[in-house]
Image: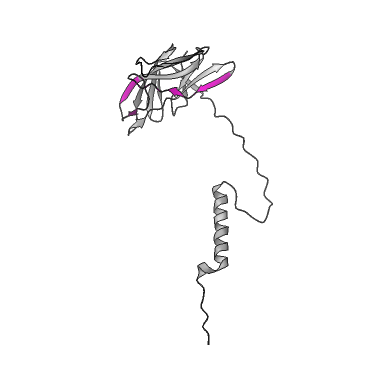
C-alpha cells in the first residue's frame, strides 16, 4: 500500500490566493478606499475639494503677548532695512525692489521640555489678497533667531527677518508658529 503524503498548507495554491485577497483588501483600506465588493449598490463617491485654511480670526498688536502651543510670543518692534546682519560674512542684501521686515520678538518656552524655535509667518494684505511669507531669512549671528532650541521656562529676545517687496510696508501681520492669533504690526 502506498502512503499518501500530505502537502504542508503553505504549498497549496488556495493558501496564496487567500493571502493575496487579504493583502489587496488591507491596501484598499490603507489607501482610504472601501474593500472591494461584488455588489455596486453604494452611492457614488464625491471628491472633496481642498479648501484653503481659514484665516485667523483674532488679532493682537505690537507689545501684546500671544500664547501658542509651546511658547509665549511678544513682538517688540518692526523695522525695515535693505540689509540684514552686521557681520561682513553673514550680512545679506535684500536685492533690487525688496527690503527686509525685521521683527524684534521675545519668546518664552512654556512647555515641559526644550523646543526648537520656528520663524512663523509674515502676512500682508495687498490688493484684496492676503499674501503669506513663510520663509524667514537665516542670519547666523548674535541677535538673530534661527536654529535655536529653547529650554523650559527660559526666554530669548532676538530678530526674525522676512524678505518682502518694497511696496509692502503697511497691512502687515505676524503669525507665530502653532498659533491662530495674528499680531497686527501696522
Q: Which residues are magenta?
A: 129-157
Point out residue 151 in the picture as x, y percentages from the top left corner. 31, 30
What is the x, y in percent for residue 23?
Answer: 54, 56
Residue 176 image point, x, y percent: 43, 24
Closer-to-camera residue (72/96): 96
Residue farthest to the right, as pictured: 41
Residue 83 shown in magenta: no
Q: Is residue 162 above or below residue 10?
A: above
The image shows residue 86, relative to residue 136, as above or below, that is above
Is residue 140 a member of the stretch shown in magenta? yes
In the displayed orientation, state which residue is furthest to the front: 89
Q: Specify the color scheme.
A: one colour
Name the residue located 50 percent from the left edge and 71 percent from the top edge: 8
Residue 126 visible in the shown view: yes
- Which is more toward the observer, 180 or 158? 158
- Residue 22 percent location from the top left of the image: 55, 58
Farthest-out residue, bottom: 1
**Residue 46 vs residue 83, the one in the foreground:** 83
Left/right placement of residue 134 relative to residue 51 reads left
| Residue at (64% x, 39% y) in the render | 47
- The answer to whether residue 174 is above or below residue 32 is above
Image point (44%, 12%), residue name: 82
| Residue 36 left/right relative to 86 | right
User: In the rendered picture of this protein, how many numbered marks are placed on residues?
Assistant: 0
To which quarter of the image does residue 148 belong? top left
Q: Residue at x 48, y 15 (%)?
A: 95
Q: Quadrant of residue 126?
A: top right
Q: Is residue 63 visible?
A: no
Q: Is residue 136 left or right of residue 33?
A: left
Amino acid at each position: 500500500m502506498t502512503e499518501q503524503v500530505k502537502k504542508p498548507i503553505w504549498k497549496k495554491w488556495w493558501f496564496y490566493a487567500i493571502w493575496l485577497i487579504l493583502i489587496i483588501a488591507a491596501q484598499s483600506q490603507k489607501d482610504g478606499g472601501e474593500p472591494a465588493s461584488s455588489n455596486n449598490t453604494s452611492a457614488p463617491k464625491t471628491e472633496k475639494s481642498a479648501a484653503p485654511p481659514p484665516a485667523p480670526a483674532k488679532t493682537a498688536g505690537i507689545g501684546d503677548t500671544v500664547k501658542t502651543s509651546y511658547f509665549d510670543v511678544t513682538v517688540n518692534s518692526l523695522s525695515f532695512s535693505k540689509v540684514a546682519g552686521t557681520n561682513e560674512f553673514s550680512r545679506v542684501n535684500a536685492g533690487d525692489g525688496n527690503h527686509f521686515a525685521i521683527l524684534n520678538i521675545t519668546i518664552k518656552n512654556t512647555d515641559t521640555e526644550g523646543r526648537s524655535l520656528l520663524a512663523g509667518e509674515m502676512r500682508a494684505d495687498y490688493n484684496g489678497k492676503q499674501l503669506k511669507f513663510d520663509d524667514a531669512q537665516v542670519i547666523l549671528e548674535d541677535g538673530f533667531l534661527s536654529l535655536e532650541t529653547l529650554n523650559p521656562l527660559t526666554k530669548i529676545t532676538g530678530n526674525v527677518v522676512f524678505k518682502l517687496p518694497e511696496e509692502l510696508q503697511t497691512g502687515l501681520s505676524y503669525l507665530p508658529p502653532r498659533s491662530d492669533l495674528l499680531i497686527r504690526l501696522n
